[in-house]
Image (spheres, coloured by chain):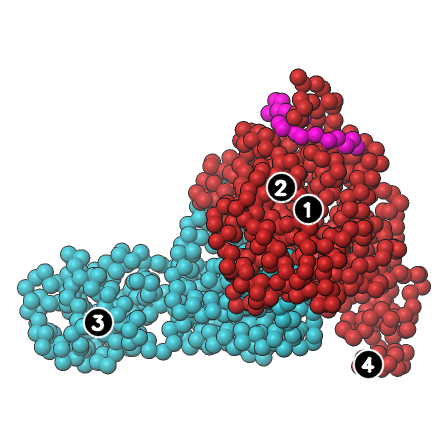
Amino acid sequence: MNDIMLSDTIAAVSTALGEGGIAIIRVSGPEAISQVAPLFRSRIPLIEVESHTVHYGHIVSPGDGENIEEVLVTVMKAPRSFTTEDVVEISAHGGVISVRRVMDLLLQQDIRLAEPGEFTKRAFLNGRIDLSQAEAVIDLIRSKSDRAFSIALKQVSGSLSQRIHALRHSLIETLAHIEVNIDYPEHDVESLTSEFIKTKSREGMDGINKLLKTANEGKILREGITTAIIGRPNVGKSSLLNALARDNKAIVTDIPGTTRDVIEEYVTINNIPLKLLDTAGIRETMDVVEKIGVERSRAAFSEADLILLVLNANEPLHEDELALMEQISGRQVLVIMNKMDLPSKLDQEVLLRYFESTNIVPMSVIEEEGLDKLEDAISTLFFGGKLESGDLTYVSNVRHIALLKKAYQSLQDAYEAADLLVPIDMIQIDVRLAWEQLGEIVGDTAADSLLDQIFSQFCLGK
Amino acid sequence: MSYDGGNYDVIVIGAGHAGCEAALAAARMGCNTLMITINLDMVAFMPCNPSIGGPAKGHVVREIDALGGEMGRNIDKTFIQLRMLNTGKGPAVHALRAQADKFLYQHAMKETMEKTPNLTLRQGMVETLIVEDGRCAGVVTKTGTSYHSKTVILTTGTYLRGKVIMGELTYESGPNNQQPSVRLAENLRELGFDLVRFKTGTPPRVHRDTIDFTKTEIQPGDDKPKFFSFETKSSQNEQLPCWLTYTSEVTHQIINDNLHRAPMFTGIIEGTGPRYCPSIEDKVVRFSDKSKHQIFLEPEGKNTSEYYVQGLSTSLPEDVQLAILRSIPGMEKVEMMRNGYAIEYDAMVPTQLWPSLETKRLPGLFTAGQINGTSGYEEAAGQGVMAGINAARKVQDKEPIVLDRSQGYIGVLIDDLVTKGTNEPYRLLTSRAEYRLLLRHDNADLRLTPIGYDIGLIPQQRYDIFSEKKERVDQEVKRLQETKVKPVEVNSILEGMQSASIVDGSNLLTLMRRPELDYSFVDAVSPSPVELDEEMKEQVGIQIKYAGYIEKQLQHVERLQKMEKKKIPDDIDYTDIHGLAIEAKQKLTKIRPISIGQASRISGVTPADVSILLVYLEHYNRVTAAKG
């Protein structure tokens, strides 16, 4: 069965990302070699290499030739590969940033991000995987898709989705205008000028540019609000983490192509994505107060947007905790007074010198009491604008970035075509593409909405 | 008392635009065909606007003609105006629109049908379908005649339980006070079909001699008209103009004052009307900020004084209609000859059909046209020709012909209907087509004539002419690519055509891509060694100039067609497929898509569901293959 459905070229990070490790980006499909070739600088051009050989070189930005990453590239030609298609594997150093940049470049080629389980699916459809495993393949697709879907939904909630919707609304109005000009040529709506289309394309490009800027600031909605849970040993940090994770369906992502630090957990609280930092290590390395001292702990949480300081209400304040409070004053901190089910021995007056009372949350993690208050406090900080006073419209997901860049390119094509006085029904193709590409980000590509727009915007009929 | 009316291969019920195409296609493909209609004076009648074509609709007429259908030839014989619309836009959306002499149109079509071998015309009211062994095997008429057949095509238009509505008045009727078909609608329900209630409407007709045309703007036809049929090369038809005027503020006042008498708003109308063809009362209410609406006055024929008032579709009471008419500049003293009305009718839920237009529930029964929830003569005719072809092929024990979305607007139309259904009367728009650039007016023959020839609708002689045209166009594109020119050979000509000079050598194809150059440039530099007519030159120009855009769409089409080629066996039990989401299982079970491509277009079926379906199919195929 060589007649493969969706025989386009796909890519994904096929290993979990970790600092210092090796990350493998896998590209599969008929254009795998030809599409990676322009990005790969090496002694032998990629299109000339033998199958099943490994090549040293650099991934470079095709625009300015900038070196992005030192890599080893393996080429496996069809049908002798996992998917039986041409496959290119790029082994990178695995730093989150550089892998992201490589993916970013790939997705700007004629390559799309693989759907969940897609490599396995192709392998199966191409006869590479045994029949007995069909059900396992289906389970893989189902579970990964469902999880990806729920993540995607959470990801695009909030202001990113609002901004995308605003951009799309403007584009669909333009599209409706173009369509009415075409489908109702005798109707008395104003004719579209190329100036109008240029203005509209430019507006869209500017809007997309603003979103892309936030993507490069490194703060990432995809990764959520970086949140550090700190405190002395045995105050209940792990329990708190587990409680938050349980209560909010922790999302441990292994979605290919999304950036991900080694050890972290994602939760969403009232639609606010949190990245709980270094969670696997928290149990050891975050016990820094005792083990490595306050200096080291500062480094660990210096990048956090939000600090959850866990104290044991059943004990007087420890001098390490006082030092810690000194260190984090001025940061966004929520103090968790844990073990409130036990008699209180903690001097709250001291706390109030450092923190506002609204940011002090009494809890009993073991009894699962007060978790809702913590969640409310996080919401209040977030929606009150205190947490991350900057632009919260973060875009990080490589897929989003790739789609935004493609939409930008489409609008640029439309702009240039309008400039050359290309007929509007052809310019429409690019404008519509931009609208669909933005729609993919927010999961809405229904073509019917264009018709709805046409008929609500214009009075048509005979 | 019943008696036997005889045996046929194909019976077509209804003689509107769908019925005529269906009957002609089946008969021309060699099937012994019977067409039964309530009134033989109403063959190919235009109950609404006296015009054919326009964007998307005109494309469909070209496609019907390219397949060997009749609508294009018939309107070319009987037009009283031809206009190419959208000429300022790209070639894909150039759209031919004709005003028809509606009486001549009917007569010409009836004459063609009467002269067609294998085709019998019969007046009669079909009341029930004959069902034998779970398949449709004929029809019984009101007079008790049973006609047996291998296939039946229903093209009942707006006649099924038709009800005319005007102000407070309602009565059972087909269009233009024809008898409605009530018993047949009941019979379809008895047979288990899902029917919905749709509504449409038509404006009043007025007497030409009571219009003051000096207060209107003239809308003439083209001086050198192009034609719908690829066969028509010239015409002696005299053209008549249309006239443009506008509603006034008084018009809107009258409408607002009488909304309590408008069935649209009083609840008398239950059927769902089309958004793209609203009544004037609907327009005034929904777009209250618009101070005027366009009104086109269109002649209904050469030998009649009746004018169609386009833009004034209404179901307001007769007295209000007259007041509205007389509030419009140029119509102050107008005499109304026929009033406008709304009509409600039963339509099939079209997701009950296979893409061949055969019903899933009752093999042998096909439906086409307005009964499938569409609106418009062209949409009806496009389905009619396909239903005729596929009924004939069923009789001949051949696979159905299904056009995909990249092959024609007819493919888009039918795929939309059977895959997504429709909750209002469906009208084709060019924006419904993903591959608009490929579905051009000019290339309908390149897209579809080979199919028409293969199935026996395009005669050898016409096919030879087509092949010759295709060959010459291909050769010429090739020649232009191979013809190298030096700056000295072309620069003065380029200059004369306000085009930039070249520094290095080039080829003619590259130069032809320049927007400012047309084929006259080639004629000046290096004329074709073989004679090319205007149509061929146009084709060469389009293929070269828009190659970039066309290529992009062709790549998409390639992917689409891979999905379309992945057929889904009819006996698949979706409830049995592990992993499919519940919504997907329900939708797939209902629609029973014939291909993965169709499955992927069903709303509620996600990409993950499609992936799972693919894996399941692969499993299914391997197991089936293993069983041998």
Rendered location of residue B505, percent (x, y): 84, 77
Mark 3 and mark 4: Cα distance apart in space: 73 Å
Q: Amino acid at mark 3?
A: Leu
Q: Main secondary structure of the magenta part?
A: strand
Q: Which residue is mark 4?
A: B498
Visual hue assigned to chain A: cyan
Rendered location of residue A388, percent (x, y): 33, 76
Q: Are marks 4 and 2 in contact (CB under 8 Å)?
A: no
Q: Which residue is mark 1?
A: B47
Rendered location of residue B300, percent (x, y): 75, 52
Q: Kindly give the residue lying farthest to the top in the view shown.
A: B1
Q: Which residue is mark 2?
A: B158
Which residue is at a point 83% across and 75% down the rendered structure image?
B506
Which residue is at a point 61% across and 73% down the rendered structure image?
A197
Quadrant housing the N terminus of chain A: top right
Answer few, some or many: residues within 10 Å of disc 1's Cα (few below 14, many 20 plus, some between 14 and 19): some
Residue range (magenta): B119-138
Note whether A118 is above or below A413 in the view shown: above
Mark 4 and mark 2: Cα distance apart in space: 56 Å
Note whether A169 is above or below B28 in the view shown: below
Disc 4 on helix, strand or loop?
loop
Q: Amino acid at mark 1?
A: Pro
Q: Which residue is mark 3?
A: A334
Disc 1 chain ID: B
Mark 1 and mark 3: Cα distance apart in space: 74 Å
Q: Are marks 1 and 2 in contact (CB under 8 Å)?
A: yes
Rendered location of residue B494, percent (x, y): 85, 79
Visual hue assigned to chain B: red
Disc 2 chain ID: B
> Residue B526: which quarter of the image?
bottom right
Q: Earlier in the sequence, mark 1 or mark 4?
A: 1
> Residue A219: which quarter of the image?
bottom left
